[in-house]
Image: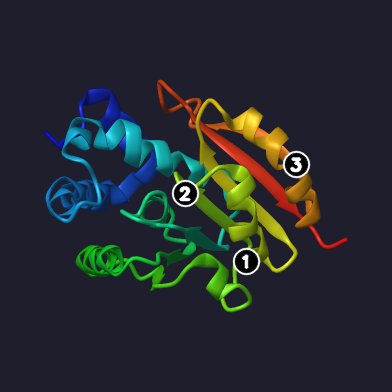
Amino acid sequence: MEDPIAEELVAAERIFGDRVNLAKRYVEHLATSGIERGLIGPREVPRLWSRHVLNCAVVEELIPEGVRVADVGSGAGLPGLCLAIARADLHLTLIEPLERRVIWLEEVVMDLGLENVEIIRARAEAVIGKVECSVVTARAVSALSTLAPLTIPLLGGRGELLAIKGRSAAEEIVKAAKIIKKLGGVSTEVLNAGVTVLAEPTTVVRVKVARR
């Protein structure tokens, strides 16, 4: 059931290229041990490709070449592992506080042989100043007004936050505007990633940060 259907396979091959088999192996982990250990709900299995893996992986098109990326609240590796598979040129630091999730992530990274991934068991606020990155990613962590203080400080005053969001993205931006500005955000916009690849593009809030 975790095998991609025709249109998902086409999208996966476009996004992951010659690493598509790694993506397939990752989905196998999600559909088996990921469910067994409570990282993914069993009802999500038919939607692993469309709703989760491809939805996350297309964010790679918004990330510059060769940068360091910190993924906050990585959980089941969404989007962190998807980005690491899609882009071997990126260095991903997965930040996850829960031990059982960290253990699972370590097992998957080892099995896939991903050399561009580092995993840290910690809360995001505990590693401010200790993690080097120019892009921070997050998905399904919290509302933007709560997420911004957890993520933007990791950038050290320069870079961008890419937060995967849903239909409430614009509303969240309005509510978080003051805190984002206080944290050094100089522009905030809603982008659609994967427009030419996915039937339903991914909604991403991008916050650009610069020292004043």
Q: CA distance from mark 2 to mark 1?
A: 15 Å
115 left or right of 185 in image: left
* Quadrant in which residue 45 is drawn: top left
Q: Nearer the viewer, residue 60 or 74?
A: 74
Q: CA distance from mark 3 to mark 2?
A: 18 Å
Question: Residue 117: x and y, percent?
Answer: 39, 68
Q: Please, what secondary structure does the residue beneath circle 2 have?
A: loop
Mark 2 residue crowding within 10 angstroms, few (<14) / some (14–19) / many (20+): some
Q: Which residue is mark 2?
A: 141
Residue lying at 72% horizontally and 40% vertically, measured from the top left: 188
Of circles 2 and 1, the one toward us is: 2
Question: Residue 65: x and y, percent?
Answer: 57, 56
Q: Which residue is mark 1?
A: 154
Asked if the residues shown at circle 3 and circle 2 are in contact, with their CB atoms under 8 angstroms apart, the answer is no
Residue lying at 50% horizontally and 42% vertically, measured from the top left: 59
Q: Amino acid at mark 3?
A: Ala
The label shown at residue 177 is 3
Q: CA distance from mark 3 to mark 1?
A: 18 Å
Question: Residue 197: x and y, percent?
Answer: 43, 28
Mark 1 residue crowding within 10 angstroms, few (<14) / some (14–19) / many (20+): many
Q: Amino acid at mark 2?
A: Val
Earlier in the chain: of badge 3 and badge 2, it is 2
Asked if the residues shown at circle 2 and circle 1 are in contact, with their CB atoms under 8 angstroms apart, the answer is no
The label shown at residue 37 is none
Give the vertical position of 119 relative to 10 (above or below): below
Q: Amino acid at mark 1?
A: Leu
Outermost residue on the right side: it is: 212
Earlier in the chain: of badge 2 and badge 1, it is 2
Residue lying at 73% horizontally and 49% vertically, measured from the top left: 180
Which quadrant is the C terminus positioned in?
Answer: bottom right
130 left or right of 107 in image: right
Asked if the residues shown at circle 3 and circle 1 are in contact, with their CB atoms under 8 angstroms apart, the answer is no
